[in-house]
Image (cartoon, rainbow, N blue to C red):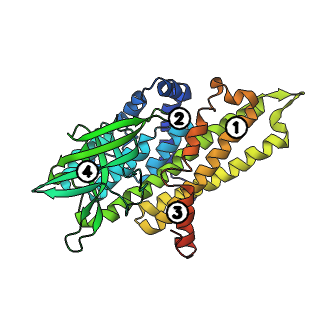
């Protein structure tokens, strides 16, 4: 076992961090507050190949794994420039297409994922079913050679920036008549597809949308991979989503901890730096420990996924996502407390992170569902739902 990242990944982290720090958190919050997008940063990262590090080399990507892409995501967040669409477009959508897409789908989409030219949203969550693939009401039926999609999705990230949406629907099994999951690539300009922004109390450059599909007609080639392998295809995307979600939280936790530590060293009261007092030093030290532990679990999850161990990756990815979300919340809260009143001042760039880290407990899978998974699959306890 090796707990040290390769020199190549360390160099990748450094290069990505240098790029992101050149933009910084002030750039991010200015864009987010104005209703804009991080297009400048995204496009430059794409040109430099950072968004395509996990795309197979034969399609113009870096040929790396989800661990490399997670490192890129973490460094963006650690520099104060979190791009939520990274969790969705290159991690979920590109991974699913690379593993299960047809030859034509790979040729059409992967080279553009590699350069960041294309953005794709992912739509599974529904108002009544949440992310429960067995209760989704979005359905697809055949009409000659075409597919007709109907349904509704909610909390879909970045649809206004996306060229297409990878939609999770359900089709009827010809043998049993039961519904089974199926994945479709739906261009955002397809007739019958409508999206409306959901107003959120978040300072984020990535917006959330409700998605409406009303008799959306798609050609046969819109179906991703095999109709019979859709459940495996779905989970091929959900494990990377959890790993990337963990990296997202880790990066924000690092950003907040660095800010808190720097302020504790610089700010003096009664003739001594406030960091010399255990009331502040110990909580910051505790966060450092928990951050390192969550980082190791995230690396383990990525390593298992990249080795082809999907089952082991599922357990580790859920644990990593849980641990990273918890330490991110603690890190931001303690960094604000360390700053005192300045912690809520825009100048210090911490208050805007309160909502961002809280999302980590909810999405892409809630803390409670992670605990259900661990109780049932890791501990062998009876299923509770």
Taking the view exactly as shown, the residue that stands out farthest to the right is 270
Q: Is residue 190 left or right of residue 334?
A: left
> Which label sits on residue 150?
4
Q: Is residue 346 above or below residue 46?
A: above
Q: Position of residue 21 (x, y in %)?
A: 53, 30
Query: As rendered, which of 162 and 13 lies closer to the eye?
Result: 162
Q: State which quarter of the image contains the N terminus.
A: bottom right
Q: Position of residue 182 (x, y in %)?
A: 28, 59
**Pointer 3 local density, CA inside 10 Å: few below 14, some 14–19, many at least 20:** many
The CA span between labels 3 and 4 is 35 Å
> Which label sits on residue 335?
1
Residue under label 3: 316
Q: Position of residue 121 (x, y in %)?
A: 35, 44
The CA span between labels 2 and 3 is 29 Å
The answer to whether mark 1 and mark 2 are in CB contact below 8 A is no
The answer to whether mark 3 and mark 4 are in CB contact below 8 A is no
Residue under label 2: 202
The first of marks 4 and 1 along the sequence is 4
Query: As rendered, which of 6 and 262 lies closer to the eye?
Result: 262
Secondary structure beneath disc 1?
A: helix
**Pointer 1 local density, CA inside 10 Å: few below 14, some 14–19, many at least 20:** many
The residue positioned 36% from the left and 47% from the top of the image is 153
> Which label sits on residue 317?
none
């Amino acid at each position: 076992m090796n707990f040290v990242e390769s020199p190549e990944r360390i160099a990748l982290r450094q290069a990505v961090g240098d790029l992101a720090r050149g933009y910084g958190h002030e750039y991010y919050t200015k864009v987010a507050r104005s209703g804009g997008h991080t297009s400048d940063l995204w496009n430059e990262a794409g040109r430099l190949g950072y968004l395509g590090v996990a795309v197979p080399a034969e399609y113009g990507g870096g040929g790396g794994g989800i661990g490399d892409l997670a490192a890129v995501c973490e460094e963006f967040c650690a520099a104060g420039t979190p791009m939520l669409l990274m969790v969705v477009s290159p991690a979920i959508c590109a991974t699913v297409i690379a593993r299960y897409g047809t030859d034509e789908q790979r040729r059409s989409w992967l080279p553009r994922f590699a350069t960041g030219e294309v953005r794709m949203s992912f739509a599974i969550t529904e108002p009544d079913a949440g992310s429960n693939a067995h209760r989704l009401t979005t359905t697809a039926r055949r009409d000659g050679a075409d597919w007709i999609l109907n349904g509704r999705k909610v909390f879909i990230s970045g649809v206004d920036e996306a060229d297409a949406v990878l939609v999770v629907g359900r089709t009827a099994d010809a043998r049993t008549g039961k519904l089974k999951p199926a994945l479709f690539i739906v261009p955002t300009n397809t007739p019958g597809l409508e999206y409306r922004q959901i107003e959120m109390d978040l300072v984020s450059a990535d917006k959330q949308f409700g998605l409406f599909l009303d008799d959306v007609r798609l050609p046969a080639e819109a179906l991703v991979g095999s109709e019979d392998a859709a459940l495996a295809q779905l989970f091929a995307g959900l494990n990377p989503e959890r790993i990337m979600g963990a990296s997202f939280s880790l990066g924000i936790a690092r950003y907040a901890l660095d800010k808190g530590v720097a302020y504790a060293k610089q700010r003096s009261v009664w003739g001594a730096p406030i960091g010399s007092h255990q009331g502040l030093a110990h909580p910051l030290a505790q966060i450092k420990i928990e951050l390192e532990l969550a980082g190791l679990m995230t690396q383990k999850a990525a390593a298992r996924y990249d080795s082809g161990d999907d089952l082991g990756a599922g357990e580790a990815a859920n644990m990593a996502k849980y641990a990273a979300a918890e330490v991110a919340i603690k890190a931001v809260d303690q960094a604000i407390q360390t700053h005192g009143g300045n912690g809520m001042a825009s100048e210090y760039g911490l208050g805007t992170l309160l909502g961002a880290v809280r999302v980590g407990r909810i999405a892409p899978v809630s803390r409670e569902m992670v605990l259900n998974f661990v109780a049932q699959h890791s501990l062998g306890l009876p299923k509770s739902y």
